[in-house]
Amino acid sequence: MSVISVITKGHQPTVDVSSRRWSDARWRRNALGTTLEILVPLALLGIWEFVTTQLVHSFYFPPLHKILSTLVDVWFFDHMKADLVPSVARLLVGYGIAVILGVGIGAFLGLSRRAQIAVEPLIEFLRSIPPPAFLPAAMVIIGVDDGMRVFVITFVCLWPILLNTADGIAGVDQGFLDTAKVFGIKGFERFRRVLLPAAAPQIFAGMRTTLAIGLILMVISEMVASINGIGYFVLNSQRTFAIPEMWSGTIVLGVLGYLLNFMFLCVERKALHWHRGLKAGQNV
Amino acid sequence: MSAEVRSTLGVPLNELNSGGFQLPSWCWPLITVAVVLCFWEFCSRFGIISSRFIPPMSVTFAKLGEEALSGSLWPLVGDTLRGWALGLGIAMGIGIPTGVLLGSSPLAYRSVRVIIEFLRPMPSVALIPLTVLVFGIGLKSEVFLAAFAALWPVLVQTLYGVADTDPVAVDTGRAFGLNGWERLYKIKLPSALPYILTGVRISSAVSLILAVTAELIIGSPGLGQAIEAARQGSAYDAMYALILATGILGYLLNIGIMRMQCRLLHWHQSQRRIAP
């Protein structure tokens, strides 16, 4: 012990000096990286603006400033209320139902191996169907209304969440289960305090992939049949050759995808901060 | 001593027999599938759900068989497969080299990070209207959409994989006198391969989704377009038969990619089976 501490102590100053020298170079690299991080996207936007105003006058690629001014005119706040809010509401309702059902059924399957094996081929098959292919069937069975759009989003989002939950719960460390048994934790309390937290990282992974699919389904369910929603707005703008409006809608969708993803990561980080701590602890 | 047989969900199959009930474990999936199919047939035949909107299972499968035997199904499958393959191929052709480049150079990565982070979560279907204007309604649009959507998973996975290479291994390579290319081929790429193949698997699914979406919405020829045409023509048995065909195609593609992954990664930890 003492030998080690002497060696470490003896080495520490040199390490400090070299790390300071290193950190100087590293700081410079870091500053360069940050500059590039900000400048390159701005430069690209600048090139777009320059090319579309000065070099090429294309009907399909309007100048950037025109798109941005259309974006402000159109989306603040007329179409935000008329198109964006209904879209996001449908997505969140469909996604929410999928999470509740997926975690519920998935937990049941995770606990019963027999049930899990029994339904596996069915779920594997339903999951393999490319989600948009469900859309015509849902239109025939349910009709063209908001219920259909919510249903399609739920139906498609359900499987990844369900499979991940089943997998996560089936893989809970036997030690946790034994400990819960010793302390007499049973039933719902066991589910809420032992199984769910232990499976949470995997459940969140399923929920994150699903969010992207849900967003796609939100857009195309509005493109196929709708009278409002952002997917309808974008396609309708294209069909009426309102090109700057179409571009503004595309950008709004990009921002929406980015924000949803960002918010999800924040929630995940908050919900799983203990897990990250545990991981870091193990690595040390 | 025998290796454990596991189902895809990771459940050891032989553990099922430990209960008092001595039904072989492979029976259970068959029973469930049979029950669901019978339930479908029953509901439709006895009018619990309208047999006009959901034809009985037997009718749907008969239709599927008829389409397959008459040969009208295969050109559609071929069209969809072509869109899928071109989309995935282009995505891999762009994604893997770019990922290697960005993964080996932190500065290059940081300069495009914002762009990637913005484009990646964007629902690629948002580009459908623009694509129609620029590429028309044919195969080109379908391939562009599929390639655009499939690019991100494979690009990001390659990037992470290459950046995650053990620096000691790279330094060892350098010490043994390997030059940059050799280090890339002999150390970085093999070490990134598991990541890259995971990316390819996700991209393959995404590419198929976007190919079908493009057919459904834009109307480029293929299964998606045929499904929508069957719906509009109220030929509901054909519609369900085609949806089933799409599902089978997706299932087979997924299995094929998994097989390839197993074969290429037979040396890797994740594919080794531990004998108890």
Image: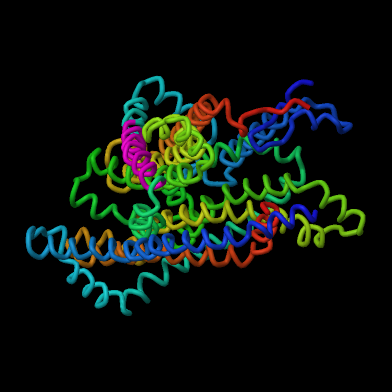
Q: Say which residue appears at 23% left-offset and 72% top-offset.
A: A68
Tell me if residue A128 comes above or below residue B276 in the rendering: below
The segment highlighted magenta reads B82-103
**Does the stretch in magenta take in B85?**
yes
Left or right, residue A66 beside residue A277: left
Instruction: Give the x, y percent position of residue B84.
Output: 36, 35
Instruction: Give the x, y percent position of residue B151.
Output: 36, 44
Residue B250 in view (yes/no): no
In the rendered image, which quarter is residue A77 located in?
Answer: bottom left
Instruction: Give the x, y percent position of residue A266.
Output: 54, 67
Q: Say which residue appears at 51% left-offset and 52% top-offset.
A: A209
Q: Quick one: which residue is furthest to the bottom in this view?
A: A77
Left or right, residue B197 beside residue A159: left
The foreground one among B15 and B263 is B263
Residue B68 in view (yes/no): yes
Tell me if residue B206 comes above or below residue A217 in the rendering: above
Instruction: Give the x, y percent position of residue A230.
Output: 34, 65
